[in-house]
């Protein structure tokens, strides 16, 4: 278990290690199935199920909100990784959710975890659904944020929304995530700026940006997932926390309602005046709800 940080970092004794946070935790690698997976892990090792983070379209390790990772790590062992061909992980990127789930399972097995909690955001939430359908015995609980089921409304057209907002960002000199993840209300705009600033807090040993080929492979996976026949989610008996904003343009919010309705043991939280990145906009509330959910 990690030692608690001192009350005042300036009072650390000589030789004492600084607090490990998402800002400074080292990136490691582990090999599974011929792939060198880049990952970071931190937090409280109680011997229970670790929380494995599954991230969104075009994301690498540095796209996780530090407040969410550090908030969860205060109570749990947290691991985030780059899937095959993404960021600093080796190999060719997968172009289907099923393949990404197989890679995630290989990573989890290589780490020696018998049972895990999954937290999937957006594309990561779709991968999480495939994992629990493939190996239900490996999953204890799941948090699904800003995501939807196979065949869900608007998922096959994510590429169109993404490219449109990338152009909006280009012509206004802003990060596209300001448009993709947040509403255009004053509150959405300000919390979007704060989120983007948090992503820059780590200044050393940052991850490798996603390649164009990997980005296109993920878009193809989303297109196929959106056109896929709906899965029978009634067989998923694990407790689920489903979270989204009330105005998600990327994966329309109706998909979160659909997931909560079809999953037998689910809790639904919809944040007001929030978009696809509602969990980032309401990060403090999201962390509290997730910790409560995992503790039950």
Image (spheres, helix red, strand yellow):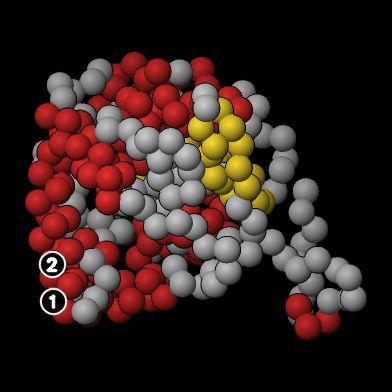
Q: Is residue 152 left or right of residue 59?
A: left
Q: Report crowding for label 2: few under 14, some 14 to 19, many 20 or more residues within 10 A (C-alpha).
A: some
Q: Helix, strand or loop at disc 1?
A: helix
Q: Residue at x 31, y 72 (%)?
A: 192
In the depicted structure, whether residue 54 falls above or below residue 7: above
Q: Quadrant of residue 280?
A: bottom left
Q: Residue at x 21, y 61 (%)?
A: 180
Residue placed furthest toward the right: 14
Q: Helix, strand or loop at disc 2?
A: helix
Residue placed furthest toward the bottom: 10
Tell me the quadrant of the picture where the C terminus can be found: top right
Q: Which residue is mark 2?
A: 167
Q: Is residue 75 visible?
A: no
Q: Is residue 59 left or right of residue 66?
A: left
Of 28 and 152, the residue lying toward us: 28
Q: Position of residue 274 (x, y in %)?
A: 25, 63
Total numbered circles = 2
Q: Position of residue 79 (x, y in %)?
A: 57, 44
Q: Which residue is mark 1?
A: 171
Pointers 1 and 2 in contact (C-beta within 8 Å): yes
Q: Quadrant of residue 30?
A: top right
């Amino acid at each position: 278990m990690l030692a608690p940080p001192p009350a005042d970092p300036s009072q650390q004794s000589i030789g004492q290690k600084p607090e490990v946070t998402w800002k400074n935790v080292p990136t490691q690698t582990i090999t599974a199935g011929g792939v060198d997976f880049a990952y970071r892990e931190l937090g409280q090792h109680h011997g229970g199920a670790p929380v494995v983070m599954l991230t969104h379209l075009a994301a690498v390790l540095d796209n996780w909100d530090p407040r969410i990772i550090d908030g969860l790590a205060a109570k749990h062992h947290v691991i985030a990784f780059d899937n095959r061909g993404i960021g600093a992980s080796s190999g060719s990127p997968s172009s289907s959710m099923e393949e990404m789930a197989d890679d995630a399972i290989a990573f989890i097995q290589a780490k020696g975890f018998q049972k895990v909690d999954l937290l999937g955001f957006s594309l990561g939430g779709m991968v999480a659904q495939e994992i629990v359908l493939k190996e239900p015995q490996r999953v204890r609980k799941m948090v699904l944020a800003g995501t939807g089921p196979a065949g869900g409304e608007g998922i096959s057209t994510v590429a169109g929304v993404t490219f449109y907002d990338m152009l909006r960002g280009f012509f206004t000199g802003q990060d596209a995530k300001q448009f993709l993840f947040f509403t255009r209300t004053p509150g959405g705009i300000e919390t979007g700026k704060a989120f983007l600033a948090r992503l820059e807090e780590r200044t050393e040993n940052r991850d490798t940006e996603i390649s164009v080929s990997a980005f296109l492979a993920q878009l193809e996976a989303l297109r196929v997932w959106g056109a896929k026949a709906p899965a029978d989610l009634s067989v998923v008996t694990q407790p689920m926390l489903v979270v989204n904003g009330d105005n998600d343009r990327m994966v329309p919010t109706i998909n979160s309602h659909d997931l909560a309705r079809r999953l037998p043991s689910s809790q639904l939280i919809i944040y007001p005046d929030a978009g696809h990145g509602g969990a980032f906009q309401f990060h403090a509330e999201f962390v509290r709800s997730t910790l409560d959910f995992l503790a039950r």
